Image: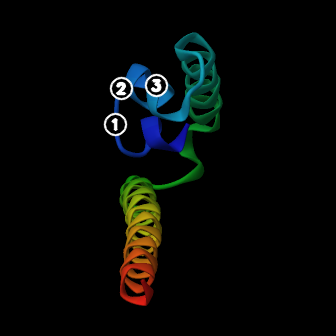
Amino acid sequence: MGLVVDTGRAVATVARELGINEATLGRWVNMFRTRQDADGGALSETERAELARLRRENAELKMDRAFLKEASLFFAQEASDTNEKRSH
Protein backbone atom coordinates (compact mmCIF):
# COMPACT_ATOMS: atom_id res chain seq x y z
CA MET A 1 0.00 0.00 0.00
CA GLY A 2 2.85 2.35 0.85
CA LEU A 3 4.24 1.97 -2.64
CA VAL A 4 1.00 3.38 -4.02
CA VAL A 5 0.15 5.99 -1.39
CA ASP A 6 3.65 7.20 -0.57
CA THR A 7 5.20 7.24 -4.03
CA GLY A 8 2.12 7.96 -6.13
CA ARG A 9 2.71 4.90 -8.32
CA ALA A 10 -0.25 3.28 -10.06
CA VAL A 11 -2.13 0.49 -8.28
CA ALA A 12 -1.87 -1.72 -11.38
CA THR A 13 1.91 -1.32 -11.58
CA VAL A 14 2.51 -2.03 -7.90
CA ALA A 15 0.10 -4.99 -7.89
CA ARG A 16 1.87 -6.50 -10.89
CA GLU A 17 5.30 -6.06 -9.25
CA LEU A 18 4.10 -7.63 -6.00
CA GLY A 19 2.25 -10.42 -7.75
CA ILE A 20 -1.10 -9.65 -6.17
CA ASN A 21 -4.54 -8.95 -7.59
CA GLU A 22 -5.00 -5.34 -8.70
CA ALA A 23 -8.56 -5.15 -7.33
CA THR A 24 -7.41 -6.37 -3.91
CA LEU A 25 -4.63 -3.79 -3.69
CA GLY A 26 -7.05 -1.11 -4.90
CA ARG A 27 -9.49 -1.97 -2.10
CA TRP A 28 -6.69 -1.85 0.49
CA VAL A 29 -5.53 1.55 -0.77
CA ASN A 30 -9.10 2.91 -0.73
CA MET A 31 -9.69 1.63 2.81
CA PHE A 32 -6.41 3.20 3.93
CA ARG A 33 -7.24 6.54 2.32
CA THR A 34 -10.74 6.50 3.84
CA ARG A 35 -9.28 5.98 7.31
CA GLN A 36 -6.72 8.73 6.70
CA ASP A 37 -9.46 11.13 5.62
CA ALA A 38 -11.51 10.26 8.73
CA ASP A 39 -8.55 11.14 10.96
CA GLY A 40 -8.40 14.51 9.21
CA GLY A 41 -6.41 16.90 11.38
CA ALA A 42 -4.15 14.39 13.10
CA LEU A 43 -1.06 15.83 11.38
CA SER A 44 -0.24 19.32 10.20
CA GLU A 45 0.36 19.90 6.50
CA THR A 46 4.10 20.20 7.16
CA GLU A 47 4.08 16.92 9.07
CA ARG A 48 2.15 15.20 6.29
CA ALA A 49 4.63 16.44 3.70
CA GLU A 50 7.57 15.26 5.79
CA LEU A 51 5.92 11.87 6.36
CA ALA A 52 5.26 11.47 2.64
CA ARG A 53 8.89 12.41 1.86
CA LEU A 54 10.22 9.94 4.41
CA ARG A 55 7.99 7.17 3.10
CA ARG A 56 9.16 7.79 -0.47
CA GLU A 57 12.76 7.80 0.71
CA ASN A 58 12.18 4.57 2.65
CA ALA A 59 10.66 2.90 -0.40
CA GLU A 60 13.62 4.00 -2.53
CA LEU A 61 16.09 2.69 0.05
CA LYS A 62 14.30 -0.66 0.13
CA MET A 63 14.55 -0.89 -3.65
CA ASP A 64 18.25 0.07 -3.50
CA ARG A 65 18.88 -2.58 -0.86
CA ALA A 66 17.12 -5.24 -2.94
CA PHE A 67 19.19 -4.26 -5.97
CA LEU A 68 22.43 -4.40 -4.01
CA LYS A 69 21.51 -7.81 -2.63
CA GLU A 70 20.94 -9.11 -6.15
CA ALA A 71 24.18 -7.55 -7.35
CA SER A 72 26.17 -9.12 -4.52
CA LEU A 73 24.69 -12.53 -5.34
CA PHE A 74 25.59 -12.04 -8.99
CA PHE A 75 29.18 -11.08 -8.22
CA ALA A 76 29.56 -13.90 -5.70
CA GLN A 77 28.43 -16.36 -8.36
CA GLU A 78 30.76 -14.74 -10.89
CA ALA A 79 33.70 -15.10 -8.51
CA SER A 80 32.76 -18.71 -7.83
CA ASP A 81 32.62 -19.46 -11.56
CA THR A 82 36.02 -17.82 -12.08
CA ASN A 83 37.58 -19.87 -9.28
CA GLU A 84 36.18 -23.09 -10.74
CA LYS A 85 37.68 -22.29 -14.16
CA ARG A 86 41.10 -21.63 -12.58
CA SER A 87 41.10 -24.95 -10.72
CA HIS A 88 40.57 -26.95 -13.91
- The image shows residue 63 at horizontal and vertical percentages of 41, 58
Q: Which mark is residue 16?
A: 3
Q: Amino acid at mark 2?
A: Ala
Helix, strand or loop at mark 3: helix
Residue sitting nearer the eye, 15 or 46: 15
- Please report the residue visible at 38 percent of the width from the left and 26 percent of the height from the top: 13
- Please report the residue visible at 41 percent of the width from the left and 53 percent of the height from the top: 52
Write down the residue under mark 1.
8
Q: Amino acid at mark 3?
A: Arg
- Please report the residue visible at 59 percent of the width from the left and 50 percent of the height from the top: 42
Q: Is residue 84 above or below residue 11?
A: below
Q: Which image quadrant is residue 70 in?
A: bottom left
Q: Are marks 1 and 2 in contact (CB under 8 Å)?
A: no
Q: Nearer the viewer, mark 2 or mark 3?
A: 3
Residue sitting nearer the eye, 34 or 61: 61
- The image shows residue 68 at horizontal and vertical percentages of 40, 71
* Residue lying farthest to the front in this orientation: 88
- The image shows residue 28 at horizontal and vertical percentages of 63, 24
Question: Cα distance, mark 1 to mark 2?
Answer: 7 Å
Q: Are marks 2 and 3 in contact (CB under 8 Å)?
A: no
Q: Is residue 46 above or below residue 19?
A: below
Q: Which quadrant would the N terminus be assigned to in this image?
A: top right
Helix, strand or loop at mark 2: loop
Q: Nearer the viewer, mark 1 or mark 2?
A: 2
Q: Which image quadrant is residue 9 in?
A: top left
Q: Is residue 30 above or below residue 59?
A: above
Question: Cα distance, mark 2 to mark 3?
Answer: 10 Å
Q: Is residue 71 above or below residue 32?
A: below
The answer to whether residue 58 is left or right of residue 33 is left
Write down the residue under mark 2.
10
Helix, strand or loop at mark 1: loop
